Image: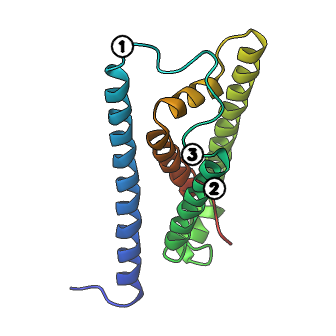
Amino acid sequence: MALTGPAANDRRFTRLVVALFALAGLAMVLVLAAALGVLGGQAKAVCADPPRLHSELPQPAILGILVACFLAGGLTASWSMRAVHHVGHSRARSILEDRRNRLVMRLTFIAVFLLLTLLMALEAGALYFHVWPITYYVRCANQGGTLLTVLGAGLYSFLAGRWLWVWR
């Protein structure tokens, strides 16, 4: 029996979102493989110590690309919100009202923000002890291959937008 109406639309949206998510994940794996391939063939240091602040693309352009990728991820998140995941849908309402699910969601957000806080503390400690901080590695990657770095960061921003951005 073929589905028609809203159920068929829900299924199409779900397939589209899953396909986009899988495509973004595959692209991230390919970017990582390409980056490792480029770095594996280096006979000398990829960048200076400390890495340059400027690259092929101006930093505002890179930032604009990453913001656009984040927003694109957010827009794909809103597509699935029209379907079963909408707060007004009976199945979504019962999931949100379940005390255990709310606790799991809160603990997940606490873990994510704790990890981000620890990474910021690591960055501050690295700067204090004159060790290469995380930002130096990003700048070095940007200096070694700007387009590859922007592509990888854009994919990451897309996935972060997909997960974090919720349109109301």
Quarter holding the N terminus is bottom left
Q: Name the residue rendered at 41%, 56% in the picture.
A: 21
Of the pair 38 and 66, the residue shown nearer to us: 38
Element assignment for label 2: helix
Which x, y percent locates residue 70?
A: 59, 56
Distance between the Cα atoms at labels 1 and 3?
25 Å
Q: Which residue is mark 1?
A: 43
Mark number for residue 34? none
Mark 2 or 1, which is nearer the eye? 1
Q: Name the residue rendered at 62%, 73% in the picture.
A: 87
Q: Which residue is mark 3?
A: 57
Mark number for residue 64? 2
Badge 3, how many Cα within 10 Å: few under 14, some, many 20+?
few
Of the pair 1 and 142, the residue shown nearer to us: 142
Amino acid beneath label 3? Leu
Amino acid beneath label 1? Ala
Where 157 sits versus 87, above or below?
above
